[in-house]
Image: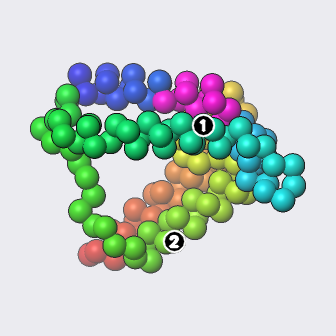
Amino acid sequence: MKNLAALACGLLFGAGLALSGMTDTAKVLGFLDLFGRWDPDLLFVMGGAVCVTLVSFRFVLRGRPLLASSFSLPAQRDVDPRLLGGAALFGIGWGVFGYCPGPALSALVYLEMKTVAFVLAMLTGMALAGLATRKAGA
């Protein structure tokens, strides 16, 4: 049941990304181009998401998840070098190519080789980060 719910949520999320234009790298890069031909469309997408989160987050956390015994919230709250490095890599990837992980996976349905290359590079980076984390902890 959990896997079916995860699939349904993922499909809904991917459809929302496509509908909002976040799978279009030209639109994303246009949004990031503040001093060129700036495209503010994605500001409304992100603003809408932030507004929904601000209103609903506290109500959601008062309850219990439907398919789990409790919410899985991060215990670590401090800013460390790993967090800063990951945020920098995320920003560089988003700024250079116009994708972050969710839209990149959603855009795979377009079967463009540049998207496939991005996702393969992203997965390779995730695997290398996992290996480095395991080695550091061992």
State the CA–CA distance, disc 2 to disc 1: 26 Å
Quadrant of the image occupied by residue 58:
top left
Looking at the rendered structure, the number of numbered marks drawn on it comes to 2
Name the spot of residue 127 as percent of width and height, x first.
Answer: 46, 57
Name the spot of residue 68 as percent of width and height, x first.
Answer: 17, 35
Give the residue displayed 65% in from the left and 43% down from the top: 43
Q: Secondary structure at mark 2?
A: helix
Name the spot of residue 133 as percent of width and height, x first.
Answer: 37, 69
- Name the residue carrying label 1: 45
Q: Which mark is residue 110?
A: none
Q: Which residues are magenta?
A: 13-22
For residue 55: magenta?
no
| For marks 2 and 1 on the same chain, the one whose residue lies earlier in the sequence | 1
The amino acid beneath tag 1 is: Val
- Name the residue carrying label 2: 85
Q: Secondary structure at mark 1?
A: helix
Above/below status of 38 relative to 135: above
The amino acid beneath tag 2 is: Gly
Instruction: Choose mark 2 or mark 1, whichever is in front.
Output: 1
Quadrant of the image occupied by residue 10:
top left
Name the spot of residue 36 as percent of width and height, x first.
Answer: 87, 55
Q: Quadrant of the C terminus?
A: bottom left
Front position in the image: 108 or 76: 76
Front position in the image: 80 or 137: 80
